[in-house]
Image: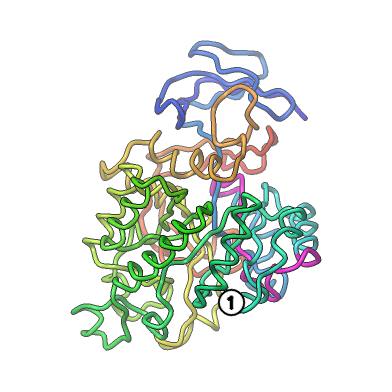
Amino acid sequence: MSNLFLTNARLIDPEAGSETLGALRIIDGKIAEILPAGFTAPDAIDCGGKCLAPGIIDIGVKVCEPGERHKESFRTAGNAAAAGGVTTMVIRPDTLPAIDSPEVLEFVHRRAVDKARVNVLPMATLTKGREGREMAEIGFLQDAGAVAFSDADSVITDNKIFGRCLTYARGLNALVIGHVQEPTLSRGACATSGPFASKLGLPAVSPMAERIQLERDLALIEMTRTRYHIDQISTACALPALERAKAAGLPVTAGASVHHLTLNELDVEGYRTFFKVKPPLRNETDRVAIGQAVASGLIDIISSMHTPQDEESKRLPFEEAASGAVALETLLPAALRLVHSGVIELPLLWRALSLNPAKLLGLKSGRLTAGAPADLVLFDPHRPFVLNRFELQSRSKNTPFDGHRMQGMVLKTFVKGQLVHSRD
């Protein structure tokens, strides 16, 4: 491991909630000490007063190995993550085949170590094949390295089976991640119900589908006391239930995707399929409420929900097109819209992007403290650019931000003190 000295940096410390000018010494891949402004060394890297923060820990990334490498591989996803300031990807198990056995998990781990430039932590499924009928080998999968368990967007409808999975996970102190969209109401929907969806003639789902599923899941969490993380809250009507659960002391955390924080249902005007995500984009009132929930701490984590799709699956009528958008490289500049609009300050944003995910997963990263891994991102929060999707490192180019004027650029990314991306 090489030793580094980063000086003249605007240190964003999410744990202390502070922004200070200072310097950072890195020894053997770890932060050795935090120094005040003015310290320098002959071989120091001058950060030019730009922001230096813990690397982003992104929960819910889809890497399409095995089965769909033409959409995204560990190599391309790792390059995209490094370019986006993401130093740890927590990958979803909804691959082909699903990550539901120690053998598949071992393959994924081996590929990640060989090809990805950043840290990769795998989830595994709760049920075999994500079919909701038979519990996966949770204990063996945890021993093999699974950091959490989820059937991704396949909701387990059988309460007895889901309850059994939760109880077993509770015995192992395992983290379960759920998708709170009631599947019967959501089936076939590609928009949020309301006048705009009616105008476009799109099959729609009520926001209540999210609240209904959330209430079901929270009742089972109250029964089992399992550690439970909600992958995406996207509607205002779900927030009171989440607030009650936290007030009651249930072991519940929640996330929001950067797309639901920065886009709304009007963006699908013209049937633009790059804006088709799951759950569908909501109205502006919901978007504002979710942003305020992140600022207050009610929603703990912001993630990209990176979901690569090939051109063929998006070049279809809106109803038939695949859901999902790539976001590893756009997560940071998109999230910075919350800062530039005054919704949240940088240290609080970094709690949602880095510190809280680290705490949830029991990681030492996500902090600017001595002894923490030197997983860091240097960025300019004000540098403008126009996004060109063909310049993205991701193999798939299905971003809703193509052609958008964005503000905030990653300059350098370090993983364990090693430079894995440099803009300049």
**Residue under the image location 44 percent in, 37 percent down:** 380
- Say which quadrant the N terminus sits in: top right
Secondary structure under the numbered disc 1 in the rendered image: loop
Pick the residue in front: 134 or 36.
134
**Residue under the image location 32 percent in, 86 percent down:** 203
**Residue under the image location 49 percent in, 77 percent down:** 157
**Residue under the image location 27 percent in, 48 percent down:** 292
Magenta-span inclusion, residue 247: no
Q: Residue furthest top?
A: 38
Q: Position of residue 189 (x, y in %)?
A: 37, 82
Pick the residue in front: 108 or 12.
108
Q: Give the range drawn in magenta.
A: 82-104
How many numbered marks, from 0 up?
1
Q: In this view, does 408 lie to the left or right of 151?
A: left
Magenta-span inclusion, residue 90: yes
Q: Where is residue 96 in the image (x, y as percent from the top left)?
A: 68, 76
Residue tagged 1: 132
421 up-or-down from 8: above or below:
below
Q: Residue furthest front?
A: 223
Identify residue type, mark 1.
Answer: Gly
Q: Where is residue 286 in the image (x, y as percent from the top left)?
A: 26, 61
- Say which quadrant the C terminus sits in: top right
